[in-house]
Image (spheres, helix red, strand yellow):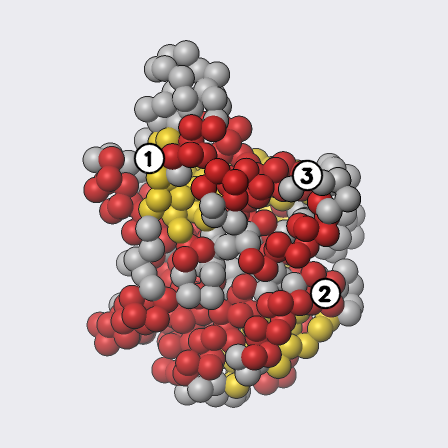
Amino acid sequence: MIKNQNGLFGQFGGSYVPDFLQTPLKELEESFFKYIDDPDFQRELQYYFKEYVGRENPLYYAKNLSSSVESTSTSSGSGGAKIYLKREDLNHTGAHKINNAIGQALLAKRMGKKRVIAETGAGQHGVATATACALFGLECIIYMGAIDTKRQELNVFRMELLGAKVIPVNTGTATLKDAVDEALNDYAKNYSNTFYLLGSAVGPHPYPVMVREFQSVIGREARQQILSIEGRLPDYLLAAVGGGSNAIGLFHPFVDDESVKIIGVEPGGKSDKEGDHAASLCKGEVGIIHGFKCYTLQNANGEPSPVHSIAAGLAYPGVGPEHSYYKDIGRAEYVSVSDQDALKAFSLLSKTEGIIPALESAHAVAYAITLAKTLPKDKIIIINLSGRGDKDVQQVEEMLRDTKKI
């Protein structure tokens, strides 16, 4: 199952952390590789995926959305490409994050750790972690940027209702990057009894590989489903990219299928100016952040730049090392979508399909709409609809109230 056991994807990844953190990371690495292919561990993981998370979830043909996109191609008729949605929004807790949270919580149990810490931006990973900890009887501490606690108040309440302690982080930009900083500080002090349940395919080895493996259930299911439905592989895969866990979960099982084009969609934010976006792959450069090498947004001193996205879960100044590698070798293309275009897609999917997407997922929907217009109707696009938009409706309503654009 594992293609990468040294933590490197070309020049990216690795473990750039102080010596005292190498010991717990080595323990984690050994435990992960011990259990990931263990039949008993996999049986338990698959049980919870099916009976608790609700997998497998549908690969849904979004016929109304597809029909609403008028094709500008004349090569194979009008109507635009067929758009399918991989419905991670239908998982228990409402997003893809539960896949990884259940997997890592089971690993924490195997390692005898009783205390779990995590970081969260949009709150979905925090909710998923709190859910898994409640299920398995583990103490749960969640670090969350103070700005994000305000724009995701409902998810904060959910985490607390599930028994987690949510700690607002006021340092720096008070968003996801700073929450990760505080979680790492906690881990450095308490690793003897603490498991750090990292939420995205970032961080020092073995986290990027570990998160990818737990999230690859998305792509494995989508692959089987599209072959069953259409009798062939898709032409395009699309997913939003912040840290990159939902995207790598969809992309990785298709990476050897050269006929399938892979496109990651980053947050273009308000403008191209520094601090107005979080498009690390499109506009960043190679650097080190949070213990790993990747494309990152940084200043002249090599410090992370401030970032912005309408979607809290995408506001991160780095990206997973596997995505960085895919960019370098040309296996995937990475583009950016503005806040405004993501908002338009949020509303369009809601109105055409009765599906309210997370703002994170809306970035991928927005680019799919643009792409589909250029394609004939016999082409197939799969979007990873990574989460539902319940958490975002109050934020969107406030933004659109005065303009009456809903």
C-alpha gap between disc 1 and disc 3: 34 Å
**Residue 125, image x and y in percent?**
53, 65
* Residue 302 falls left or right of residue 15: right
Q: Which mark is residue 150?
A: 2
**Disc 3 target residue:** 405
**Residue 378, image x and y in percent?**
32, 24
- Closest to the observer, 205 or 164: 164
**Disc 1 target residue:** 234
Q: Which mark is residue 225?
A: none
**Residue 312, image x and y in percent?**
64, 56
Give the mark nearer the N terminus: 2 vs 3.
2
At label 1, counting other C-alpha atoms closer than 10 Å, the crowd grade (few under 14, some 14-19, many 20 or more) is many
The answer to whether residue 273 is above or below residue 249 is above
C-alpha gap between disc 2 and disc 1: 39 Å
Looking at the rendered image, the disc whose residue lies closer to the viewer, 2 or 3, is 3
Which residue sits at x=44%, y=76%? 132
The quadrant of the picture occupied by the N terminus is bottom left
- Closest to the observer, 262 or 56: 56
The answer to whether residue 147 is above or below residue 299 is below
Q: Please name the amino acid that badge 2 sits on.
A: Lys
